Image (tube, coloured by chain):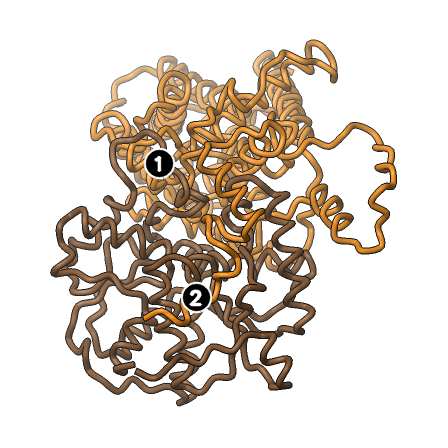
Amino acid sequence: MNVSIIIFIVLVVVSLGLFTKNVRTIVRNIKLGKDLDRNDNKGRRFSLMARVALGQSKMVVKPTAGLLHIVVYAGFIIINIEVLEIILDGLTGKHRLFSPLGSLYTFLISSFEILALLVLTACVIFLIRRNVLRIKRFHSKEMTSWPKSDANLILITEVLLMSAFILMNAADTQLQNILCAHYTQVGEFPVSGMLVGMLVGMNESNLVLMERGLWWFHIIGIFAFLNYLPYSKHFHILLAFPNVFYSKLTPKGQLTNMDAVKKEVELMFDPNADPYAAPPEPVGEPERFGAKDVTDLTWKQLMDAYTCTECGRCTDVCPANITGKALSPRKILMDTRDRLVEVGKGIDKNGKDFNDNKSLLRNYITEEELLACTSCNACTEACPVNNDPLSIIVDLRRFLIMEESKAPTEWTGIFTNIENNGAPWQFAQADRLKWKDEV
Amino acid sequence: MSELKVPTMAEMMASGQQLDVLFWVGCAGSFDDRAKKITRAFVKILNKAEINFAVLGTEESCTGDPAKRAGNEFLFQMQAMGNIQVLNDYEIKHIVTTCPHCFNTLKNEYPELGGNYKVLHHTELLQDLINDGKLTIEGRTFKGKKITFHDPCYLGRANEVYEAPRNLIEKLDAELVEMKRCKSNGLCCGAGGAQMFKEAEKGNKEINVERTEEALEVKPDVVATGCPFCMTMMTDGVKLKNKEAEVKVYDLAELIAEANDL
């Protein structure tokens, strides 16, 4: 077995091993969330996933970004068939293993090249939109440092990978032209074929160096990119599917009714309950009302956070954000993810009971942000992967109000009024029908 | 003007009359001066269409919506269970309400707590009445007038009722003009999530001003809506822009009552 095959196998094993380890960490972190049953209505869930995740139906609401995204996404998936040949090449040392397919092979590689060129173009346009046109939603306060570099890194990597693929084919074609023994005669391909002219006159060893160099660059690039995913918003290419599958299916306006509260309120309304009975012994840890930290959220809310692509469509339509308030639904999700990563690292280091005296509320998300939300659902409507930042906001508000009794004075007022006279304003219940006699 | 016929559930029960639908008036509809006009306009239409309806009157209490959205789940469920007891005791099957917040809460959040009713927003009921021939729009008060519809979040996105209010505008023979952000992309008026009851957080603009500017861009004669809180926000916005002489803010029930000279 030659050395390059051994190096290749080591590369495959290490990168897949590392990737699996990181994915398992993410799965473990998501499972830190509370239980929630989202296994109902399987049929509806599959069709939703087909439409929204596979079919990108919410991406194309913004046609330019949506169509470009479909190009990159389709290209990404289809070009992976070519990666299979590249991997087999690496494992067997046999070049162009699928070439016996004949004209079908030419057709396939030609389509991959055209797709690669389209992906490359789309990524360049995306880079221009972000960095030259500076589209507003890519430049808000949460989009500095890592999130900003992350987006650019992804795009640059894709440009480089696609370029390597096309240039590699060009070198390959020229090697065929000079009848180099190892290089199977498969003919020219449409995109790389245009570049072959530049390589005329290069000697064989340089061409082989170029072809192999690009081959290694391409495949190492792919493995590196694979292992970059778990640290990046690019992880959405995997999570978008389960995330949409487990979407909330109830009407957008419907908030959950908290079970823990329901039990207590039912007891209060039960005419047979003994008012002097001792409260039942609490079983296990007392339940916290609402969410203070990521572990108080459900696994689905945590999955939302990992799936967020930081596209900012939510923030772009948020009435609070539009009018200059501190709230940004995208930041709510990014904060949830960042805090979860922090908690996960803490658990890895110090075991399950680790406590760093920090929490999602206040260390990441401020009261001011939470209080600015109008619960209008514009964010959930806009999200291309069906994330629900509103549910996180509501759960954090629940903690503020029910555990800390921290409400703006006006809200304390309406609570008192509702309790005392059944309306948020201070009117007598007895006057409820007065409108009937007024003109 | 003839007097409004507004029987209470208690009276209906006492006289043994059958009920078509319970009209859930809501706190705004009961106490807010502007919203009370919407309530009366809707009752006039119900009277004219000879609908057997009743209200709970003093037995009605806040649905708990603002408490729930603010994060006070205890208070919400206390309110909900109290209301459900009253509604179930009267064996209520159908409810109509002029408030999208009550609509959403009654329709979506009460069932799990034991309250199962068929709940309609008043624009849906009005459309049904027209479709069934029980209500016709006679006058041509709004013929050719430009009307834009501001989608209340809790009617539109929250419950996907977009067409009923628009169909009503067309029935008025008016020209429906859409704002840049409408239907599922509609911009909130700023009142939801219990914001109605507190000062807005620090920012550079009020949400209702942003929305009003958008409405004024299409140069409407009337800004129509279907929510008492949107009504407050949009009316304030129009006043702030000094446009209250040219642009009126009305609920759809008021437009229909007006067209029918009720």
Please tell me if label 2 and label 1 are on a single chain: no
Side of B162 where B64 appears, left or right: right
Distance from label 2 to label 1 (Cα)? 31 Å
User: Which amino acid type is marked by label 2?
Assistant: Lys
Q: Which residue is mark 1?
A: B200
- Judge the density around disc 2: few (<14), some (14-19), many (≥20) Cα neighbours within 10 Å: few
Question: Where residue A401 sits in the image (x, y, percent)?
Answer: 57, 33
- According to the colouring, which chain is orange? A
Side of B191 where B74 appears, left or right: right
Picture disc at residue A207: none
Judging depth in this view, the residue of A10 and B143 nearest the camera is B143
Side of A260 where A62 appears, left or right: left
Tell me the subunit letter for badge 2: A
- Residue at the spot 86% in from the left edge and 47% down from the top edge: A274
Viewer can see residue A173: no
Question: Where residue A322 sits in the image (x, y, percent)?
Answer: 30, 37
Reply above or below: A93 against B82. Answer: above
Reply above or below: A322 against A90. Answer: below
Tell me the subunit letter for badge 1: B
Q: Which residue is mark 2?
A: A434
Judging depth in this view, the residue of A283 and B15 nearest the camera is B15
Location of residue B116 (image quadrant): bottom right
Reply above or below: A363 against A73. Answer: above
User: Which amino acid type is marked by label 1?
Assistant: Ala
- Residue at the spot 34% in from the left edge and 72% down from the top edge: B253
Question: Where residue A108 sits in the image (x, y, percent)?
Answer: 44, 44
Q: Chain B: what color? A: brown
Viewer can see residue B138: yes
Viewport quadrant of the N terminus of chain A: top right
The kind of secondary structure element at disc 1 is loop
The kind of secondary structure element at disc 2 is helix
Front disc: 2 or 1: 2
